[in-house]
Image (tube, helix red, strand yellow):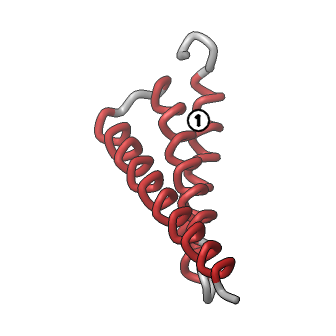
């Protein structure tokens, strides 16, 4: 992948990822009722973009952090989707 991405482009991708993570954090602090699917999806996207950036500008501790961040976001996304599905099923079962 590093043959196709210049260091400058990798930095731009990394900045986009950082923006996603900061935006998700800001969102979590300003809304009254948080959409956990959106929150975790944006966090995952941000970590994924930063991981792409790190394939060019490698830093092992940061790469590990982003992989863990993506894992946590995927766990949260799965959990949020299960809760959403369960809530929808309960609404359908209500007469």
Task: Say which residue appears at 59% left-offset and 35% top-offset.
Answer: 11
Give the percent coordinates (x, y) of residue 31: 63, 84
Q: Position of residue 12 (x, y in %)?
A: 65, 38
Q: Nearer the viewer, residue 73 or 16?
A: 73
The image position of residue 65, as x and y in percent, is: 34, 46
Query: Horizontally, is 58 left or right of 18 in the view?
Result: left
At 53% from the left edge and 50% from the top edge, which residue is drawn? 44
Q: Which element type, helix, strand or loop, lies under badge 1?
A: helix
**Location of the N terminus (image quadrant):** top right
Which of the pair 32/25 is nearer the observer?
Answer: 32
Which residue is drawn at the image coordinates 51% and 64% (left, top)? 82
In this view, 7 is above or below 41: above
Q: Is residue 36 left or right of residue 92?
A: left
Residue 14, placed above or below residue 81: above
Q: Is residue 15 above or below residue 20?
A: above
Which residue is denoted by mark 1 in the rendering?
11
| 82 lies above or below 75 | below
């Amino acid at each position: 992948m590093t043959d196709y991405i210049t260091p400058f482009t990798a930095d731009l991708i990394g900045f986009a990822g950082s923006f996603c993570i900061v935006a998700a954090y800001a969102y979590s602090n300003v809304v009254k009722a948080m959409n956990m699917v959106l929150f975790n999806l944006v966090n995952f996207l941000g970590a994924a973009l930063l991981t792409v950036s790190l394939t060019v500008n490698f830093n092992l501790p940061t790469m590990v952090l982003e992989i863990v961040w993506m894992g946590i976001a995927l766990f949260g996304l799965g959990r949020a989707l299960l809760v959403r599905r369960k809530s929808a099923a309960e609404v359908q079962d209500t007469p």
